[in-house]
């Protein structure tokens, strides 16, 4: 990573990591995270919560966090829903409800509403647009590289509709976003798909979680890590925003987020070094 982190930490500083998954903590092609294991172990030893923030569904993320041994709250479908365990906070946040073993806070619009919206956009633009709701499990598996079991979890959507625009010429993203906005919806660009959602985003969910942690901790220091435009709202809010290097470049982002750090390595290897560097800086204070 570039320049060192210059923040001063006190002994009571409470660190929170907000991390995207695909292309960030998980390898873009293999979905592995082994290269990030040293930093994951360090976070666990120091009781630093890792809040996973992804376009993935609740079902996918529950499966992953069990494999990663992560128990912090998590954010599904680009900020659509926040899920957490009873012991994550001393007091139960307002507006939450108990749902299938976890507490849930909904920010996004319902999935049927998004499906109707995508059909309207497709008819208006007369583009060949294909959403997850138009695909079977086999096709989702082929497009994502996920095995059929995980693809089935990826299809269990609540707040976000991934879609592809099947046209050879360059896609007019302005027209696409305008058609979505007309319907009170938003389009974001992830690593593999466009995503149709409500006016929720990762940053709004992150803000909500930080506000809950503030009831228990006076000084909070947030680290945000992501690799795609749908992570930018999260990076803008973070005390230390980290852009994980990918095949795409975002030269304008450094101007928008001057404190942005960019990793030299991609995926979990970049994630690992970024977290170790930041937490080592804490030790040096």
Image: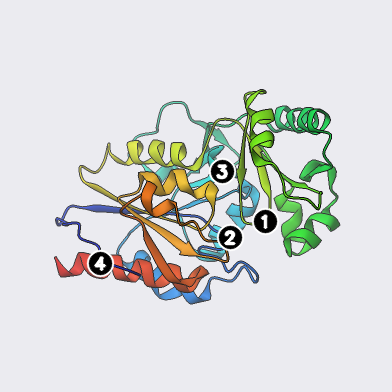
Task: Specify the quadrant of the image occupied by residue 45.
Answer: bottom left
State which mark lies toward you, 2 or 1. Answer: 1
State which mark lies toward you, 3 or 4. Answer: 4
| Mark 4 Cα shell of 10 Å, populated few (<14), some (14-19), many (≥20) | few
Sequence-wise, the earlier of marks 4 and 2 is 4
Marks 2 & 1, CB-CB < 8 Å contact: yes
Q: Alpha-carbon distance for marks 2 and 1?
A: 9 Å
Q: Alpha-carbon distance for marks 1 and 4?
A: 31 Å
Element carrying mark 1: loop
Looking at this view, name the residue that lies furthest to the front: 169
Q: Which residue is mark 3?
A: 78
Element carrying mark 2: loop
State which mark lies toward you, 4 or 2. Answer: 4
Q: Which residue is mark 1?
A: 192
User: Which numbered disc covers residue 4?
Assistant: 4
Is residue 92 shown above or below 235?
above
Element carrying mark 3: helix
* Residue 132 % position (x, y): 77, 45
User: Which numbered disc covers residue 22?
Assistant: 2
* Residue 186 % position (x, y): 61, 33
Sequence-wise, the earlier of marks 3 and 4 is 4
State which mark lies toward you, 3 or 1. Answer: 1
Sequence-wise, the earlier of marks 3 and 2 is 2
> Which residue is found at the position 20% from the left and 60% from the top?
6
């Amino acid at each position: 990573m570039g320049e060192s982190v210059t923040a001063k930490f006190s002994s009571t500083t409470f660190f929170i990591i907000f991390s995207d998954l695909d292309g960030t903590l998980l390898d873009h092609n293999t979905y592995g995270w082994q290269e990030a294991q040293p930093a994951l172990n360090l976070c666990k030893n120091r009781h630093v919560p890792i809040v996973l923030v992804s376009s993935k569904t609740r079902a996918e993320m529950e499966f992953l966090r069990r494999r990663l041994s992560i128990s912090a709250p998590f954010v599904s479908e680009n900020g659509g829903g926040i899920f957490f365990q009873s012991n994550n906070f001393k007091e139960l946040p307002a507006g939450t409800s108990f749902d299938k073993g976890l507490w849930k806070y909904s920010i996004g619009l319902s999935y049927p509403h998004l499906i109707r919206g995508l059909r309207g956009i497709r008819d208006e633009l007369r583009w060949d647009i294909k959403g997850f709701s138009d695909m079977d499990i086999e096709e989702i598996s082929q497009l994502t590289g996920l095995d059929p079991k995980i693809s089935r979890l990826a299809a269990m959507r609540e707040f976000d509709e991934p879609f592809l625009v099947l046209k050879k010429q360059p896609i007019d993203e302005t027209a696409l976003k305008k058609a979505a906005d007309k319907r009170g919806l938003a389009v974001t660009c992830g690593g593999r798909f466009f995503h149709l959602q409500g006016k929720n985003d990762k940053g709004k969910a992150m803000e909500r979680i930080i506000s809950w942690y503030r009831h228990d901790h006076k000084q909070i220091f947030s680290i945000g890590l992501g690799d795609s435009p749908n992570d930018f709202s999260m990076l803008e809010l973070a005390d230390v925003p980290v852009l994980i290097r990918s095949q795409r470049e975002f030269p304008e982002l450094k101007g928008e987020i001057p404190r942005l750090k960019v990793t030299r390595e991609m995926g979990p290897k970049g994630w690992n070094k970024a977290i170790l560097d930041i937490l080592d800086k804490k030790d040096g204070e």
